[in-house]
Amino acid sequence: MSITVYVPRDASALSLGAEAVAEAISAEAKQCGADVHIVRNGSRGLYWLEPMVEVETPAGRYAYGPVQLEDVSALFEADFLHAGKHALGLGPTEDIAYLKSQQRLTFARTGIVDPRSLDDYRAHDGYRGLEAALRMSSADIVNVVTDAGLRGRGGAAFPAGIKWKTCLDANADQKYIVCNADEGDSGTYADRMIMEGDPFVLIEGMTIAGLAVGATHGYIYLRVEYPHAQRSLEAAIAAAETEGYLGDDVRGSGKAFHLEVRMAAGAYICGEETSLLESLEGKRGQVRFKPPLPAIQGLFGKPTVINNVVTLASVPIVLDKGAAFYRDFGMGKSRGTLPIQLAGNLKRPGLVERAFGVTLRELIEGYADGTASGRPVRAIQVGGPLGAYIPISQLDTPIDYEAFIAIGGMLGHGGIVVFDDSVDMAAQARYAMEFCAIESCGKCTPCRIGSVRGVEVIDRMVAGDAAERERNEVLLRDLCQTMLCGSLCALGGMAPFPVLSALDHFHEDFSGAAEKAAT
């Protein structure tokens, strides 16, 4: 009987040697006469254990990791094909504590299925959401998404149902669904994990969105640095077209939906939805004035729904299980689950999908087990390079959109980057302004000029004496206020968040060179 062995094709696993491990397992099995079938799955998201190899046994999957090329021979000697004991043995995969305590809805299949197999996807409840949607009217689909409380997972947290309703009500001869897959925030990788490990769930979600608003064409605007995701998506789209899940007649419904992948321009600003549309149209990626909203006048001037990967990938389970099922997860106005990406100075970086309400402390001290350096945590940045720096005094803040707004932060795409007590927060504040200066599209003055002046003011603060620092701090705070209130988009409008939070919580790091020399 053939034994199935799972070796991830996830980009992070590949960077850690997964390809060589898969080849070695195949060669070793051939040499010893073992009938082994290797499946290249996605990652389970336990990145400190990658490459994590799994073996299918009668009792379920058994995991080993992190497996390197030189470990393969010893694994065969330990009879790992039958869950034999080895130093890298992790036990039954589903019993790993990091996974067992999660609530995976959007990531229910990631790391489990063969991402290139439509049959495997359907065997794990795939396309049940689309089947339900095909029995409903467009308005009813929108109502289900609205009732579920699904909000955009890309950063703005705007209710998906309201956006879809606006597009549905717009009169036009052509409408579009655009997936923002230009995942560029620091510490984020959830979109990539889905596209590489479960691409059909994104395709299904976009197809449902098309049925909901009357769109017949969709585009995935994919980060140019994601070649593995591109190959995975294009293979899945081809399979979906062959089986009638995409095309002129989706599953015999008489409704059309076509889908294409377009590679992004390599600019952070193109993660902003109107800059994305400009780039998708073949223009320079610059922010558009709003109104009109993209849902009314978007791609090529037509009504367009723009959502990110996690948002659209969450739609199938909402349609399959119903609005109430999804809404029962979470807290307050933050309903459902959020795939949280743990990164930075951590012992156990990885993806944790939990219902809204879990605290930063549970994530950093529980799941991640503290810093990799062993030094105390000093600061946490949540929400990418434009997110506020959170001090340890606020570690008990729940993962909730409104709770983060209350402390001057944002959840963004759910990326969490941790710093230990060796970090220089003045340097981090300077980096935020420098990043904005480099990535600005240049359309508005507060962002284009303000970020450059911000770098200069911070440099003067840390180089001067106490009196000069005080004068420049007043100037910096005033500059931040101008950027917050006057920028056209969130790049300039949020770059002050990390600067102001560093000033408020880590003021001592801005002591001038003269002061430091005196002490």
Image: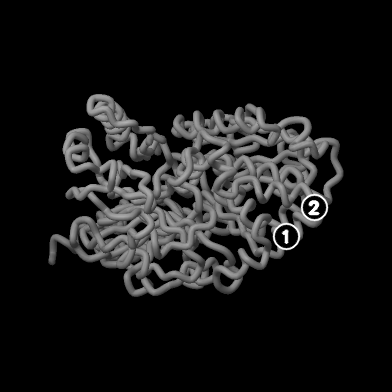
Reading the chain from its start, which is encountered first: label 2 or label 1?
2
Q: Which residue is mark 2?
A: 136
Q: Quadrant of residue 272?
A: top right
Q: Residue 386: image x %, image y %?
A: 45, 53
Q: Quadrant of residue 27?
A: top left
The residue drawn where x is 58% and y is 74% is 332
Q: Residue 450: image x %, image y %?
A: 48, 49
The residue drawn where x is 48% and y is 62% is 103
Q: Which residue is mark 1?
A: 144
Q: Quadrant of residue 146?
A: bottom right
Q: For the image shown, how many numbered marks are present on the structure?
A: 2
> 453 left or right of 62?
right
Q: How is the image coloured?
A: one colour
Please name whichever residue, 298 or 259, is drawn nearer the observer in this view of the structure: 259
Is the C-beta separation of discs 2 and 1 under 8 Å? yes
- Answer whether residue 444 is visible to the viewer in this image: no
Please name whichever residue, 92 or 460, is drawn nearer the observer in this view of the structure: 92
Q: What kind of element bears circle 1?
A: helix
